Each structure stands twice: as C-alpha cells, then as structure tokens.
Image (cartoon, helix red, strand yellow):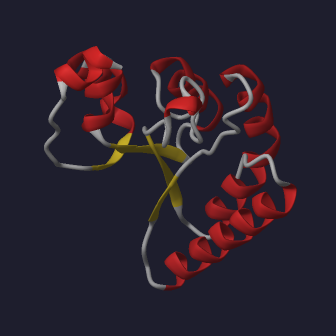
C-alpha cells in the first residue's frame, strides 16, 4: 500500500480490500499483510504516507469485522535496498507508532527470524509487543557469519 507507483499501489489496496471482504464472508477475523514501504524514502517519510493510506483500509477492515496483522519483516531483497526495504513495520521505533495510531484494529504477524538477522533483541521485543502479536511464525534460521564477514 505504500508502493511508489500509484497504479501499483491502487491495485494492491484494491486487492487487500477484496481479501478483507472475502475473509469476513468466510468468518475469518484476521488478515495478515504488510504495512508496505517505499525503499527510496526514509522510515519517517514512509510513516507520513502510511498515515494517509492506512486509515481508510483499517476502517474497511473494521467495518467487515476483520483485524489486520502486519508482518515484522523489512522486505529487503537486495544489497542496494539496505537500510530501506519495502515494509516499514519491522522495528520497535515503527511498531510503537503503529500501535499508538491503530492498536485494537492492527496487530502483529510476528516472525522472530527477522529479529535475529537484524540483531534486534528477541526477548525484549516479545516483552514489549507480545500482547499485540495476533499471529506467530515458527521456523528456524541460520546465520552465515563468514558470509556476513566477507560482505
């Protein structure tokens, strides 16, 4: 929903709204998604965009009895995207803002593996945001320390 290309952004938002409607019709009360982000912008600039884009989507979900859960992944796919990425809902800094603005309607789709490679303290993150975790991934992760050292 925060993609830099307006047509792409509109298509993504339209698709998400359809998913919300279908979830409601099927009796599914939670839809996992990404907050989004424009990798060419700062986190703060993306947050300004999020405050313009997300309220209408959140209201649409609320009207259909559906909560949204943003995954905590920065969606970084290549070296040139660091530290940007395509999802701003990955750090405590942004999660505090999300929950202050939309708690009750938006929670977290928690994937602890993303915290490991970002060097974010998992236990501290869980203590602070645990009550807002609506869905949790369970998987393993291996860090290639030599690979990181060489890059």
Left or right of 22 on screen, residue 27: left
Residue 127 position by quadrant: top left
- Residue 140 position, x and y percent, is 13, 43
Please report the residue visible at 53 percent of the width from the left and 34 percent of the height from the top: 89
Q: Is residue 137 above or below residue 45?
A: below
Please report the residue visible at 15 percent of the width from the left and 35 percent of the height from the top: 142
Residue that extends furthest to the right in the rendered view of this protein: 6
For this rendering, which residue is in front, 42 or 47? 42
Q: Is residue 138 above or below residue 124?
A: below
Total tally of numbered discs in the picture: 0
Residue that extends furthest to the front in the rendered view of this protein: 150
- Residue 13 position, x and y percent, is 72, 63
Q: Is residue 127 visible?
A: no
Please report the residue visible at 30 percent of the width from the left and 26 percent of the height from the top: 117
- Residue 112 position, x and y percent, is 26, 35
Left or right of 5 on screen, residue 141: left
Q: Is residue 83 visible?
A: yes
Please report the residue visible at 73 percent of the width from the left and 31 percent of the height from the top: 40
- Residue 120 position, x and y percent, is 32, 18
């Amino acid at each position: 929903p925060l993609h830099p290309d307006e047509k792409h952004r509109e298509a993504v938002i339209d698709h998400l709204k359809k998913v919300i409607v279908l979830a409601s019709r099927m009796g599914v009360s939670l839809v996992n998604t990404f907050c989004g982000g424009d990798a060419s912008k700062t986190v703060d600039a993306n947050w300004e965009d999020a405050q313009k884009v997300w309220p209408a989507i959140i209201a649409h979900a609320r009207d259909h009895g559906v909560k949204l859960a943003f995954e905590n992944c920065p969606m970084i796919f290549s070296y040139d995207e660091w530290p940007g990425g395509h999802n701003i809902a990955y750090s405590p800094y942004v999660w505090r803002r999300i929950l202050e603005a939309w708690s009750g309607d938006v929670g977290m789709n928690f994937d602890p593996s993303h915290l490991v490679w970002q060097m974010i303290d998992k236990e501290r993150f869980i203590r602070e945001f645990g009550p807002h975790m609506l869905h949790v991934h369970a998987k393993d992760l291996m860090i290639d320390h030599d690979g990181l050292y060489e890059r």
